Image (cartoon, rainbow, N blue to C red):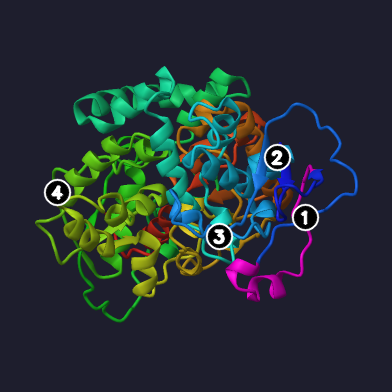
């Protein structure tokens, strides 16, 4: 896409430039200027601008509009370009329209009517956004890109619904009577699915399902053996009680990752937490919000706020990064709803499981002699800004050898339904991730989001590798069981 820098008067001819990376600036002095004094790059010409190919052109005007904009979350953007190298789709395609800076221009022009709401070019590039929010971490101006993207997708989804496959997944995840039998059937075919996993679209889908089953390297036992030295109860100081906690069970996590829930309960008990229940909870609504089905997401949010109202003093513990980011956003999602205050209080109680365990120490377990690579989920490190707590969980396991891969914080390409709707680009992003992981040769890949587990697991299987992908709390729970701290 051609970006035309237009800082001067409309009559001044300017050079249309095609950018494939951040435009060099003296960023510090640039950002110290008042907003009104921050021009966008302009190259005046003595002659009229040469003709460019008939591609849609975007005019970059003052990055901070004087009048209130239709998407105020984007107002702080100064088009500095820091976000480009953090964006997985820009790195994959080299097209600035597939970068946050380019998409911000597109969203602004859609919002204020300079582009028609059905612009195929604009919608194609917005659809190709993973929503990983790595740009927010890189942004020096505090642009709330994720909120703006969800609002724009909600506007465009009215006349442009998701694909039939995506609509089916959204309907099943939202309704427990549909979800439970569907996921029960998936569990039945899961052992076969792993063996049939491969690189074709069908093989990759089967590999994704197969990756939901907890697997361990053969030389590491998942339960303590009789008479094993690590299984003896060590002499330890009593763990002080930490108060009540309630586990958010979700939809995919409940149906396909119940082993992660069990590990979470074990780790919580060992570290002094008392578990209580919240019946009536369900899907967090993240898939629906990301797909532009905002009203469906709001309905699910109301259901969950009501379900947890009976345990107002309990910490809400989440072991899925995507769910945690969504639950923490309920106050924003229900901003104009009668439940806004209750939703805000709900969001303030939400913690990732790594946070509650790190707050307790956590208690050290028995050795696990494993070489592991931790791959932080985007919605944990970028959306929730939780980075140190997972490291503390892994540090509580003696004998664990951490290997660090390049670009660990980059998205794996899963992004919920993205891997279904944007299969080719999703696999491109995944290939970059797998190259980085294979370079450090881990025995186990560790991550904390179901979509990441499935996507990375399927990708490794497609490459002929049997490397397990596990949740950090699974390793900690097995370490506790080997130490005899929680025989289960």
Give whichever of discs 4 and 1 has the lower sequence position.
1
Separation (CA) of disc 3 from disc 4: 41 Å
Which residue does the image show at 40% across and 35% down from the upper left?
Answer: 155
Q: In this rendering, is residue 42 above or below 395?
A: above
Horizontal arrangement in the rendering, residue 208 relative to residue 169 (left or right): right
Q: Which residue is mark 2?
A: 92
Label 4 neighbourhood size at 10 Å, few (<14), some (14-19), many (20+)? Answer: some
Q: Position of residue 3 (x, y in %)?
A: 72, 43
Q: Is residue 487 visible?
A: no
Q: Position of residue 404 (x, y in %)?
A: 65, 60
Q: Which residue is mark 3?
A: 64
Magenta-tinted stretch:
17-37
Residue 203: quadrant of the picture: top right
- 64 or 167, nearer to the observer: 64
- 337 or 393, nearer to the observer: 337
Identify the mark at residue 379; answer none if there is no mark.
none
Separation (CA) of disc 4 from disc 1: 55 Å
The magenta stretch spans residue 22: yes
Considering the image in quadrants, where does the C terminus appear?
Answer: bottom left
Q: Quick one: SS at disc 2?
A: helix
Residue 178: quadrant of the picture: top left
- 391 or 399, nearer to the observer: 391
Furthest toward the front, the residue is 11
Give whichever of discs 3 and 4 has the lower sequence position.
3
Separation (CA) of disc 1 from disc 3: 16 Å
Horizontal arrangement in the rendering, residue 30 relative to residue 14 (left or right): left
Q: Which residue is mark 1?
A: 42
Q: In this rendering, is residue 357 above or below 416?
A: below
Q: Nearer the viewer, mark 4 or mark 2?
A: 2
Q: Quick one: SS at disc 1?
A: loop
Q: Which residue is mark 4?
A: 307
């Amino acid at each position: 896409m051609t970006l035309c820098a237009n800082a001067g008067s409309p009559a001044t001819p300017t050079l249309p430039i095609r950018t494939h990376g951040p435009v060099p600036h003296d960023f510090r002095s640039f950002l110290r200027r008042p907003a009104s004094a921050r021009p966008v790059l302009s190259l005046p010409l003595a002659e009229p601008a040469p003709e460019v190919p008939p591609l849609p052109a975007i005019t970059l005007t003052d990055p901070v509009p004087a009048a209130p904009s239709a998407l105020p979350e984007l107002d702080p953007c100064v088009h500095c370009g820091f976000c480009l190298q953090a964006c997985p789709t820009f790195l994959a395609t080299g097209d600035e329209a597939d970068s946050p800076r380019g998409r911000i221009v597109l969203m602004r022009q859609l919002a204020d009517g300079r582009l028609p709401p059905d612009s195929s070019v604009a919608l194609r590039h917005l659809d190709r956004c993973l929503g990983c929010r790595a740009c927010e971490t890189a942004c020096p101006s505090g642009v709330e890109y994720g909120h703006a993207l969800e609002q724009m997708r909600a506007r465009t989804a009215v006349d442009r619904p998701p694909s039939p496959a995506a609509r089916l997944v959204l309907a099943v995840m939202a309704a427990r009577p549909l979800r439970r039998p569907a996921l029960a059937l998936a569990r039945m075919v899961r052992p076969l699915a792993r063996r049939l996993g491969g690189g074709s679209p069908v093989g990759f889908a089967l590999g994704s399902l197969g990756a939901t089953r907890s697997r361990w390297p053969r030389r590491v036992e998942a339960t303590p053996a009789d008479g094993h030295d690590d299984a003896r109860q060590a002499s330890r100081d009593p763990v002080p009680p930490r108060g009540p906690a309630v586990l958010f069970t979700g939809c995919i996590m409940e149906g396909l990752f119940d082993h992660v829930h069990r590990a979470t309960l074990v780790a919580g008990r060992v570290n002094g937490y008392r578990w209580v229940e919240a019946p009536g909870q369900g899907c967090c609504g993240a898939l629906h919000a990301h797909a532009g089905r905002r009203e469906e997401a709001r309905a699910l949010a109301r259901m969950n706020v009501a379900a947890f109202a009976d345990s107002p003093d309990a910490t809400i513990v989440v072991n899925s990064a995507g769910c945690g980011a969504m639950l923490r956003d309920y106050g924003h999602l229900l901003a104009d709803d009668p439940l806004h205050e209750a939703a805000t209080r709900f969001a303030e109680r939400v913690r990732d499981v790594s946070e509650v365990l790190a707050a307790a120490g956590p208690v050290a377990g028995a050795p696990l002699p494993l070489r592991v690579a931790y791959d932080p989920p985007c919605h944990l490190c970028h959306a929730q800004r939780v980075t140190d707590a997972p490291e503390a969980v892994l540090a509580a396991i003696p004998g664990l050898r951490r290997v660090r891969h390049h670009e660990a914080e980059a998205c794996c390409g899963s992004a919920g339904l993205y891997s279904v709707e944007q299969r080719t680009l999703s696999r491109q992003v995944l290939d970059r991730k797998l190259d980085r992981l294979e370079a450090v040769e881990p025995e186990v890949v560790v991550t904390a989001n179901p979509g990441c587990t499935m996507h990375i697991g399927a990708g490794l299987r497609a490459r002929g590798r049997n490397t397990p992908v596990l949740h950090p709390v699974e390793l900690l729970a097995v370490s506790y069981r080997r130490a005899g701290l929680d025989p289960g």
